Amino acid sequence: MELDIKQIMDIIPHRQPFLLIDRVTEMVPGQSIKGYKNLTYNEPFFAGHFPNEPVMPGVLQIEALAQLGAVCVLSLPENKGKIAYFAGIKEAKFKQKVIPGDRLDLECEIIKTKGPVGVGSAVAKVDGKIACKAEISFMVG
């Protein structure tokens, strides 16, 4: 299942400049999802991080992964119209810089759920190399 930006915005409440997914390329609702964010020099965070050497902040890479995971979980019929709240981050690692012109490929697998709480294993890559990875927890409410 693929989703364009309008379909993504029908599922999660994030909007520009804080919507950090451009497209979903594959998804099994409630199980796994892949997508991407194309980064341009015009991203608002590049202006201050850092003016002479723009780098996407690691926390925004994690946020992009969390948004992708939220799309996966909120695509289940029983979660339609709900919000997935960020509940925690474990084992976050940052392996390389993400800069203007990069395509940040995002993947998340939902590895555990119990009621409204769940955990996703997530990774972001640029050109096939890991930029960051983390275990992210969420609560649907």
Image (cartoon, helix red, strand yellow):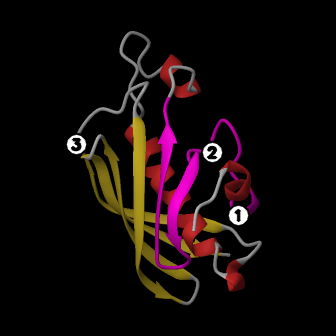
- Looking at this rendering, what residue extends furthest in the top direction? 52
Q: Residue at x 45, y 70 (%)?
A: 137
Quadrant of the rendering where the N terminus is positioned: bottom right
Q: Which mark is residue 38?
A: none
Disc sitting over residue 95 in the figure: 3
Does 32 appear in magenta?
A: yes
- Residue range in magenta is 10-39
Residue displayed at 57% across by 21% down: 42
Q: Identify the residue at horizontal 43%, vertical 26% (top origin).
A: 101
Q: Secondary structure beneath disc 2?
A: loop
Report the number of discs. 3
Give the spatial CA distance, label 3 vs label 1.
30 Å
Any magenta on residue 83?
A: no
Q: Is residue 2 visible?
A: yes
- Circle 1 — which element? helix
Percent position (x, y) of residue 92? 30, 55
Above or below, 49 relative to 93: above
The residue shown at (29%, 40%) is: 127
The CA distance from mark 2 to mark 3 is 23 Å
Q: Which residue is mark 2?
A: 19
Residue type pointed to by label 3: Lys
In the depicted view, which residue is nearer to us: 40 or 137?
Answer: 40
- Expressed as whole percent of the image width and height from the top left, the position of residue 33 reads 47, 66
Q: Which residue is mark 1?
A: 11
Give the CA separation, mark 2 to mark 1: 12 Å
